[in-house]
Amino acid sequence: MTRGLFVIRLTAHSAVRADTRLPLVAGRPDGERPTQEDHVTPRRRLAGIGAFTLASALLLSACGGGSGEDPEATEDTGASTGIVTVSNGEPQNPLIPTMTNETNGSQVITSLFAGLVYYDADGVPQNEMAESIESDDNQTWTITIKDGWQFTDGTPVTAQSYVDAWNYGAKLSNAQNLSYFFEPIEGFSYEKDSELTGLTVVSDTEFTVQLTQPESDFPLRLGYSAFMPLPEAFFEDPEALGEAPVGNGPYMLDEWVHNEQISLVPNPDYQGGREVQNGGVDLIAYTEENTAYNDLLGGDLDIVKNVPSSSFATFETDLGERAVNQPAAVIQVINVPEYLKEFQGEAGTMRRAAISMAIDRETITDTLYNGTRTPAKDFSSPVITGWTEEVPGNEVLTYDAAGAKAMWDEAESMDPVGADFTLFIASNADSDHQPWVDAVCNNVRDALGIDCEFDPYATFDEFLDARDNESLKGLFRGGWQADYPAMSNFLGPIYGTGAGSNDMGYSNKEFDAKMTEGNGAATPEEATASYIEAQSILFEDVPGIPLWYQNATGGYAETVDNVVFGWDSDPLLYQVTKSE
């Protein structure tokens, strides 16, 4: 197979080829660098918070808030100075770009670090450190990056900063959750420690990247946190800098009080397009979404990323124009651990399909979610280019209680689990998941004649730890918020053999081959065709059971303006304005 070469240069100015260019984003002029201590702003502790949080991992949103327009597309109103408070939860892992693959940590990482590109509210890549990304063949690329950037410890961001960070993320013994994203680069290995031999530093302003095949959407991925740079100090003490990150993004860390809040202050040296319009952000860790929503209504919180289901019928009336209810790249699924004996083999596959067919998605989304969820037709999202509901095999997502019972009974005749079998569905209890799990369990009991129970974990990080340690006793919630706006991101990172978010242990060589085929396709249309074939394989094996696509059901207080929820359901914090 022909190997590809990316050439990445860090310079001040360079021409851009029209065939594959990404949009240019102007940087801020250089200025004298104040110390981090000079910019620490005293924090006002919130009243009435009570129990601290964990926002649900999955929302949906495109864009909304303030005047309903993206502030980047309107006249600059000038930066404000107020501290914006936002509902969140305790991150599961240290704040390392290649380690963070869950939503409580991801918004912190994207605030503290800047990469080659970032995604705007509509999911369109905008150059951040990069001035241009160019290629004639999707295999050899030249990336030119603005000169003069630095980390918040004053050290420069160089080509070595990227190469070292990517090598750290890819190295097997470092056990980074996002190592999968470096698989296309030559030298990557799932079996042993191996340097990414496809990365070569040419100078402080240039490095090359050699791939094992052409990758049509490789530039689109480069805004994801896995590809962000790290300073030299990180490699001297990764544990310390995972607790107190040194980044190059629009914000820098003021304080992380575990299980309470993460406080961010503006980075005065940031030169990219995500110019901060507020005095800082406090991400508050709630353990109850109802508490967060009540704090919003009571004036003690500025932004809620998840509205509890108990308020779905009223939140748009409660908040008026400040309510957010819009599509985004998020899907809710139930995943099936491969280590569960009752779901192995042919009988196990039939049981997976039977459970899927037993779920009345239409009724659940209508009665519980008041139009904020849409029954799933595939494994991706309707907001993603190439989505279709005509995926072969997706009939297992159609409610058919009689067919589900017949399939379950046939599986019992082949390899019985017994009449006293209980199906457990695990999730975190600090977000609003029990109502839908209870509804699904009612469907399963009625259709299949077996018992079904919610298996709760107190907090999101506890749930994720149990999932990662393979200590769950049944199925588990496995919703997905896209990392970058492409169909492949809903498939490979979750169901690819050895992938960082493949928490089920699923492996199918035919699926992997279809993903490789799609990643190397010459056109987006050819890639989409391969990804749809890959989904058909998933519908045969049912490693996950798609439930519904989620809307971003958030909201904000009268204290803030210019609130925009992005394509991936997260609010664009840097755009929010708030008076003192």
Image (cartoon, rainbow, N blue to C red):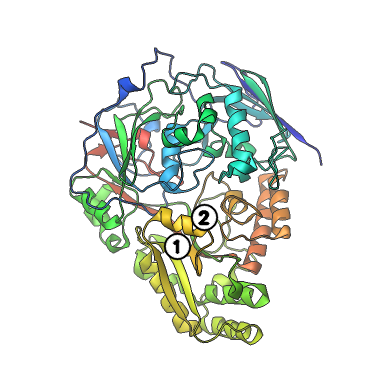
Q: Does residue 430 appear in this view?
A: yes
For marks 1 and 2 on the same chain, the one whose residue lies earlier in the sequence: 1
Q: Which of 19 and 481 is in front in this view?
A: 481
Q: Where is residue 58 in the image (x, y as percent from the top left)?
A: 43, 54
Q: Residue at x 23, y 56 (%)?
A: 317
Question: Vertical placement of 259 versus 406: above or below?
Answer: above
Q: Where is residue 306 in the image (x, y as percent from the top left)?
A: 34, 53
Question: Vertical placement of 36 versus 173: above or below?
Answer: above
Residue type at numbered disc 2? Pro
Q: Which of 217 and 210 is in front in this view?
A: 210
Residue type at numbered disc 1? Thr
Task: State the image quarter where residue 371 is shown.
Answer: bottom left
Quarter of the rendering occupied by the C terminus: top left
* Residue that label 2 marks: 382
Q: Nearer the viewer, residue 455 or 548?
A: 455
* Residue that label 1 marks: 374
